[in-house]
Image: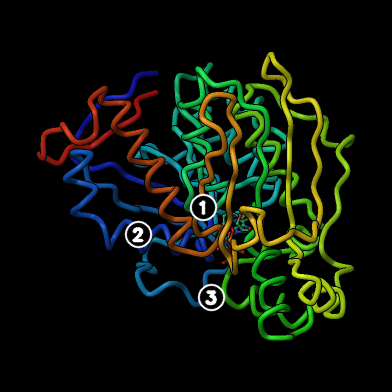
């Protein structure tokens, strides 16, 4: 298989909910900027959904909708696939099929990446295509890119962060508005922050998956997920939150992993912690996420930004698409000719 450059890059989108709709909007709103920096226009040409009658983001051209993800993956008129369906099935089959058809894939699917990431990456490498997944962790924050491409001289001792926007939003609303966990969760769902099954958020699974992806991005090897103590925020009550506030503390859902001198992950945890005001994670509020990276040379570097939501997540997906495109053309993005080109995958 070889990939060649032509005038427009044709994107096949799987899923058009919060994230997929955001991708369509982001590509439309920043079309000129993307052409300017990558030298190509990224155009969504087909969109697979489950229910053709549902309301969609206003930027979505309903003529592009179909209810057959396999047809989108196999379509020779699609150059690259964005997976925004979520869950394991049929997302895993869809990504496998896209890769086998010689298409690079960009995904926001943390569950799939945490459980099957290495297998999918090997499959993509064997087929000569790429798999990108920045959007699967910490929303719009470029955490995977940073962990994969920086910290080669530092020995990173620890990663510690707030990686679930829904949990952080819920805990912040409980503290600031005095609402119950269930009321705050309903609000997070309305805003598009929560997983399709929100127990993934409030029981800590989503954070555990993200910790696995972050650990692999830094160390090249993952954790034994079954051995990690994992707790969510489901049992935290309004009274717990108020008690913490009067003691000068704040409940936060925190993930943590430590590394040995060789950079291997040695211990990890996922769960709520009542932080004191001097903790750098104490002031991370609402849907914000943060990742503190402790290097032996640099000290502590903290990345912070929006951890969930349509455009923040779409931003990470579109940055991955541009990264893929500019790597493919082997030119630094800002030095590409402004002439629109298109990329095609030939089997
Ligand atoms: P969502 O709003 O529930 O959207 C899922 C989309 O996938 C829907 O459009 C749905 O179609 C479609 N879909 C599901 N099964 C399908 C099938 N078998 N065939 C075709 N289409 C199918 O979910 P989301 O919030 O956008 O999340 C999508 C992914 O992004 C998940 O992996 C999630 O973890 C990840 N993510 C989400 C956020 C966020 O802030 N929401 C942030 C980062 C990452 P219908 O619309 O017709 O039902
Ligand atoms: N449900 C996830 C969260 C979406 O709230 O963090 C972003 O990955």
How far from the left and from the top, in percent, is residue 274? 79, 61
Residue 147 percent coordinates (x, y) = 53, 31
Q: Report the side of 38 relative to 225 (left or right).
A: left
Q: Is mark 3 within 8 Å of ligand 1?
A: yes
Give the left or right position of residue 270, taking residue 5 as reference: right
Considering the image in quadrants, where does the N terminus appear?
Answer: top left
Quadrant housing residue 128: top left
In the image: residue 35, left or right of residue 337: right
How far separated are the C-alphas under marks 1 and 2? 21 Å
In the image, residue 123 above or below residue 178:
above
Judged from the image, the secondary structure of the residue bearing numbered disc 2 is helix
- Residue placed most toward the observer, 102 or 210: 210
Q: Is residue 139 left or right of residue 11?
A: right
Furthest-top residue in view? 262
Find disc 1 in the rendering and name its residue: 304
Whether residue 216 is situated above or below residue 238 in the rendered picture: above
Nearer-N-terminus badge (1/2)? 2
Q: Which residue is mark 2?
A: 26
User: What is the spatial separation of the Cα atoms under label 1 and label 3, in whole angstroms?
Assistant: 34 Å
In the image, 74 versus 293, the foreground residue is 293
Q: Residue tagged by mark 3?
A: 54
Q: Residues within 10 Å of mark 3 (few under 14, many from 20)?
A: few
Name which residue lies at 55% across and 45% down: 70
Structural crowding at the residue carrying mark 2, measured as other residues with C-alpha within 10 Å and reported as few (<14), some (14–19) or many (≥20): many
Q: Position of residue 309 (x, y in %)?
A: 52, 64
The vertical placement of 227 against 83, above or below, is above
Helix, strand or loop at label 3? It is loop
Q: Write down which quadrant ligand 2 falls in.
A: bottom right
Number of marks drawn: 3
């Amino acid at each position: 298989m070889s990939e060649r450059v032509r005038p427009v890059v044709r994107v096949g989108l799987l899923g058009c909910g919060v994230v997929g709709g955001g991708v369509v909007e982001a590509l439309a709103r920043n079309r000129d900027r993307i052409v300017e920096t990558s030298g190509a226009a990224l155009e969504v040409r087909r969109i697979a959904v489950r229910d053709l009658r549902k309301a969609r983001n206003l930027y979505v051209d309903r003529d592009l909708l179909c209810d057959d993800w396999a047809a989108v993956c196999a379509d020779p008129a699609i150059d690259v696939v964005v997976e925004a369906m979520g869950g394991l099935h049929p997302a895993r089959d869809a990504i496998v099929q896209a890769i086998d058809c010689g298409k690079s894939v960009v995904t926001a699917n943390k569950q799939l990446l945490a459980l099957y990431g290495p297998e999918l990456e090997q499959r993509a490498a064997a087929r000569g295509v790429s798999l990108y997944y920045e959007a699967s962790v910490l929303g719009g924050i470029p955490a995977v890119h940073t962990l994969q491409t920086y910290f080669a001289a530092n020995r990173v001792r620890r990663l510690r962060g707030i990686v679930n926007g829904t949990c952080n939003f819920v805990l912040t609303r409980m503290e600031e508005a005095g609402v119950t966990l269930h009321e705050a969760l309903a609000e997070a769902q309305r805003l598009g922050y929560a997983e399709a099954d929100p127990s993934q958020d409030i029981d800590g699974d989503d954070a555990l998956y993200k910790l696995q992806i972050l650990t692999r991005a830094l160390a090249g090897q993952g954790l034994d997920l079954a051995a990690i103590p994992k707790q969510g925020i489901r049992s935290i009550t309004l009274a717990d939150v108020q008690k913490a506030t009067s003691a000068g503390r704040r409940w936060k859902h925190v993930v943590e992993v430590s590394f040995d001198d060789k950079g291997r992950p040695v211990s990890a945890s996922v769960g709520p912690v009542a932080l004191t005001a001097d903790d750098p994670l104490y002031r991370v509020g609402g849907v914000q996420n943060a990742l503190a990276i402790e290097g032996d040379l640099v000290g502590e570097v903290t990345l912070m930004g929006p951890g969930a939501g349509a455009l923040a997540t779409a931003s990470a997906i579109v940055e991955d698409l541009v990264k893929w495109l500019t790597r493919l053309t082997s030119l630094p993005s800002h030095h590409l000719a402004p002439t629109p080109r298109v990329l095609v995958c030939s089997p």
